[in-house]
Image (cartoon, rainbow, N blue to C red):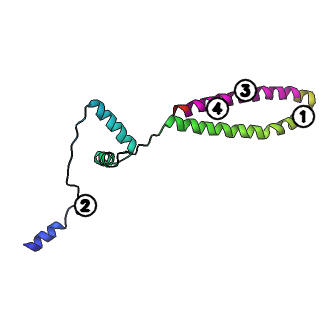
Amino acid sequence: MDNLRLEKSKRGRKPTANPKKNRLMIRLNSEEQKQFLLKYERSGMKSHSAFIADCVLNNKPNIVEINKSAIDFVILLSGSFAQARAIINNYSQISKALKNNFGEEKALVLLNVLKKTTIEMINNRQKIIEITTELREHF
C-alpha cells in the first residue's frame, strides 16, 4: 500500500520549497479599486497577489509610466533635427552652385528665397524648443 501512495505523490504539481499557505483579504470601494487596478497595470507584475505583497512588504511599488505621445514627439523631434543638420551642411554647396550656374544676380534672387525659408525654419525650431521646454516642466 505504501508503494502505491509513493507513486501517486509523483503525479501533479511539484511541491515548492516555500509554499504560500497564508491568505489575506482586503476590501476596496469602487474608487479604490480603480486606483488599485491602475497602479497594478503600471507595475507590470503578473499577479494581483504579488503586487499587493510587494506593496505591503517593500512599501514602494514599482510603477513604470510610458507616455506614448511623448515618445512620438521625441521621435519626430529627432528627425527634424537631423533634417536641419542636413540643410545646414548643404547650404554653402547650394550657394556655390547657384552662383556658378546662374550668375551673381540671379543667384542673389534665389538666395533671398532660400533665406526666407531658412528664417521660417529657424522660427519653427524656436517654437519646437519652447514646446519641448513646456513638456519638460509638465513631466
Between 133 and 56, the one lying in front of the other is 56
Does the residue at mark 2 contact the one at mark 3 (Cβ under 8 Å)? no
| Residue position for label 2 | 18
Residue 86, image quadrant: top right
| Residue position for label 1 | 99
Residue 68 position within the rendered picture, expressed as x and y whole percent measured from the top left: 49, 37
Sequence-first tag of 2 and 3? 2
Q: In the displayed structure, would residue 74 be above or below residue 23? A: above
Sequence-first tag of 2 and 4? 2
| Residue position for label 3 | 120
Does the residue at mark 2 contact the one at mark 4 (Cβ under 8 Å)? no
Q: Cα distance, mark 2 to mark 1? A: 82 Å
The secondary element bearing badge 2 is classed as loop
Q: Cα distance, mark 1 to mark 4? A: 34 Å
Residue sitting farthest toward the left: 1
Q: Cα distance, mark 2 to mark 4? A: 55 Å
Numbered circle sitting on residue 129: 4
Nearest to the eye among marks 1 and 4: give it: 4
Q: Cα distance, mark 1 to mark 3? A: 23 Å
The secondary element bearing badge 3 is classed as helix
Residue 115, image quadrant: top right
Sequence-first tag of 2 and 1? 2
